[in-house]
Image: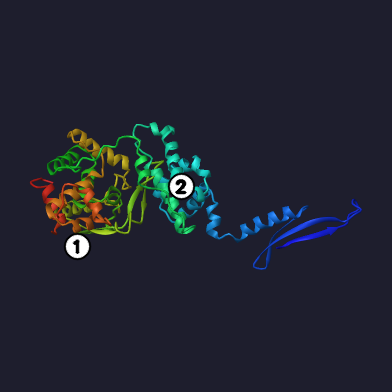
Amino acid sequence: MAVIKRRYKSKKHQKPVTYYQAEVFVEGVRVSTKTFTTKREAVFWHEKEKHRFTLSPQSLNDQMLLKECVDKFWEEAQTRMMKSTLQGYQSELPYIYDSPLANVKMSELKGIKVVEWISWLKKQPTAKNKGRKSFIHELKLLSAVLHWYRNFLNEDFNVPITKKHRQMIFYKHNAPRRPDYFIKPDDARRWVEWLKENRKNPVYWQLATFMLLTGARVGEACGLKWDAIDLEENIARVIRRVRWDQQTKRPFLEEVAKTTQSVRLLTLPERLHKILSEMKKESVSDLVFANPKGELLIYNAVQTNFNAGFVALDLPWRSTHICRHTYATIALMTTKNLSAVQASLGHTEQKVTQRYAKTVALLSSETGEKTSSAIFKDSPL
């Protein structure tokens, strides 16, 4: 034990003054020292300090506050995550930083603390917003932070988020999605024809047709450039996408797809090949689907025009993503090839594809052509 009794004389005191010097050594190197008037104080400090310097990195991380963990997570996330993902997380960070959970030590972060945090969330002003039914995105952010902590700072940490919390986070009734969540072929034809006849800019019916016949996400379709279209081979390569800034709503192009599986080849049916061939002759931009100035489309404009057709035709849909569900469902019904549809949608797992097309269980090839014939049968388009 490095607690040394020492004495010194001073002009103020005639007798030598006794004090105790505590020194902490780690691997032969003195890392800390302090003097005390009593041996008891010196021994107590020495043991505490020695313990602090000999703790494992994981034990030190256990003492970290959640807000400190979020700081480290956020610093690292900005070097690897896409702008769109960061924007989503940024809007949810206050629900952790400003919550009682922020000052909880990682070693004390248990399931009951998550329950208390969810109760706190439900009392926030935004909980009363008409469109909000849950704080699921905030829970997903917390889960991302805690999994990052386990993977990189403390592999013995148990993430305390369970099915119970994922159910609690929904505080309003969330009606299950109708089983026929797709546009019926007759309605799809009427909708595209309405867009063609009632919108001055032809890009909207062209974009709708492309999405219906390929199952491409709206960001993937809007991010297509002519260098990714091979009309000789009848294929389109999904290698980039458009994202829209959450604050300004302005579009920006990302030279990456949503996931690794999202990078894929789309077969172009004959009907779509004909449309794209005509478009390329008149195109003044490197973008396949662009506004009159040759610039990226704004999502709100796409959604507004799509929804105008749905409203005019008295259809219940109000989403651009309905085109992807429509493609998936009709492709499965007509081809009965689940694997082919899964590949064309870029899904990692078949269960995701099945969620997109709930009405079909068994599913042959020629996916694009059969889907095209089913939707545009007897149509002049």
Viewer-side residue, 34 vs 361: 34
Viewer-side residue, 162 vs 369: 162
In the rendered image, which quarter is residue 200 located in? top left
Q: Position of residue 212 (x, y in %)?
A: 20, 48
Amino acid type of the residue that numbered disc 1 sits on in the rendered structure: Glu
Number of numbered discs overlaid on the protein picture: 2
Q: Residues within 10 Å of mark 2 (few under 14, many from 20)?
A: some
**Of labels 2 and 1, the one closer to you:** 2
Q: Earlier in the sequence, mark 2 or mark 1?
A: 2
Q: Secondary structure at mark 2?
A: loop
Seen in the image, is 189 located left or right of residue 317?
left
- Residue 79 visible, this orientation: no
Residue sitting at the far left: 378
Above/below status of 119 relative to 233: above
Amino acid type of the residue that numbered disc 2 sits on in the rendered structure: Lys
Q: Secondary structure at mark 1?
A: loop
Viewer-side residue, 210 vs 230: 210
C-alpha separation, residue under disc 2 versus residue under disc 1: 56 Å
Q: Position of residue 252 (x, y in %)?
A: 37, 49
In the rendered image, which quarter is residue 33 located in? bottom right
Seen in the image, is 107 located left or right of residue 292?
right
Q: Residues within 10 Å of mark 1 (few under 14, many from 20)?
A: few
Residue topped by disc 2: 110
Residue topped by disc 1: 233
Q: Residue at x 19, y 48 (%)?
A: 357
Viewer-side residue, 99 vs 161: 161
Q: Residue at x 76, y 58 (%)?
A: 21
